[in-house]
Amino acid sequence: MNISSILGLNARFSLYSYPYNTRKGKKIAGSKLLTKKVLLKVGIATPKVWAIFRKPQGVYCFNWATLPDSFAFKPTRGLGGEGIIVVKKKARDGNGWITTQRKRVTPDDLQLHALDILEGAYNFDGIPDVGFCEEYVPRHKAFRRFAYRGTPDIRIIVFNKIPIIAMLRLPTKESGGRANLHQGAIGVGIDIATGITTHAVHHKESIRFKPGTKRKLHGIKIPFWNQILELAVESGDISGLGYLGVDVIIHPEKGPMILELNSAPGLEIQLANMTGLRRRLERVEGLKINSPEHGVKMGKALFASSLAARVKAEEEGYKTVEIFESVKIRNKRGKKVLVPAKIDTGAKSSSIDIKLAKELGLYDADNILWKRTFKSSLGKQRRPVIQITFWLKGKRIDTTAGVSDRKRLTKPFIVGSNDLTGFLVNPTPIHKNE
């Protein structure tokens, strides 16, 4: 991982969390209950709430027997998984419940825990809090072989309505079934384009297998991936957070649910993906995004992690191109002519060699649209611009191209970034002699 691309704590706050998040958004993210209220209002699913405790009197008067067989007991402002009790089932003898850590908790235990929450025992600042019991979401079948007892979650960082980076957090025996990395859970990077896991870390060390097993942690396909990314983008838009972390869980029957929002998400996600956040954030800053769907497409196109991931992305409508490709250009008589080309994301517009343009009959006066000043490694040049139609990977592209003398260059045709919409570019040439 390039050190210069890593985002640090101070930069996270001063460059992104503070300037791009509204005060209202931070307030929403700071309360799990307020987050639920805001999301449910627009129809975004979150786990159901069974009980809320705001005052000691409510704790003492509550009939604990009314709680279901399984639930999660949380502080609304708790950080890092502190103060969370996850109950998986009722005890066989009827005296209380059994947690995911296989510990018994009784109504008296829960009452004491509720009072601790109200006193702010699990807050960063010790301010009095609110406790609540919510629906327990069991593991989805896709994760049963990889997670220890508890429910995994997926963290996505969204900036400027674009999903930037993501990871799967897997509970372990050490973490007590919780999906918190600092408690011993595993972080597994996810390729944004495909929803397939790539690289795993445990206590900041790279690992390939689930501890104590030979179960590979890379290659796990996340269900509902496109829907999860769109929910993450929508959540930021609704809450007023331009830079945020979104935690998602997958209910076995109900599908994706938003667990919580974070206006200053942790940075361990960089280790899990073996890539820094800074350059990804800089890459999308200021881009105009029209909708959550548009933001997801941009994230997939910009941050596909490897050639294999790009091939997978083709299943979702994207085509992968190499640096060197062959294109078919329509000549004046309407015939398609095969031409070697270079894919150049550094060039904004496509361009064609003047000799080739003449051979194709495209340099006639009636096909020259205008003359434009182009900047290149040769300096500023005034070039004619022609109308051109070509096919790349079977896709027809009607565009314009600048005409220049390319006889000293290896390829007579350049495909610029303006004409690469819907394509994923593999930056590594597959032909070493090119």
Image (cartoon, rainbow, N blue to C red):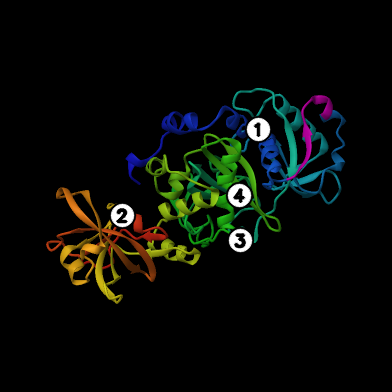
Dot 2 or dot 1, earlier in sequence: 1
Say which mark, if any, is on residue 75. none
**Of pointers 1 and 3, the one earlier in the residue sequence:** 1
Separation (CA) of disc 2 from disc 1: 43 Å
**Label 4 close to label 1 by CB (< 8 Å):** no
Judge by depth and name the residue closer to the eye, 416 or 169: 416
Q: CA distance from mark 3 to mark 4?
A: 19 Å
In the rendered view, tell whether residue 251 sits above or below residue 134.
below
- Give the number of the disc on residue 345: 2
Q: Nearer the viewer, mark 2 or mark 1?
A: 2
Category of crowding for the residue at label 3, using alpha-carbon neighbours closer than 10 angstroms: few (below 14), some (14–19), many (at least 20) = some
Q: CA distance from mark 4 to mark 1?
A: 28 Å
Disc 3 or disc 4, which is closer to the eye?
Answer: 3
Query: Label 4 to label 2, Cα distance in Å?
Result: 46 Å
Q: Residue at x 32, y 39 (%)?
A: 4
278 to the left or right of 33: left
Q: Residue 173 has which mark?
A: 4
Label 1 crowd (10 A; few <14 / some 14-19 / many >=20): many
Which badge, 4 or 2, comes first in the chain's sequence?
4
Q: Helix, strand or loop at disc 3?
A: helix
**Residues drawn in magenta:** 48-58
Circle 1: element type? loop
- 392 versus 253 height, above or below: below
**Observer able to see residue 185:** no
The three-letter code of the residue at mark 4 reads Lys
Q: Which residue is labeled 3 in the image?
A: 142
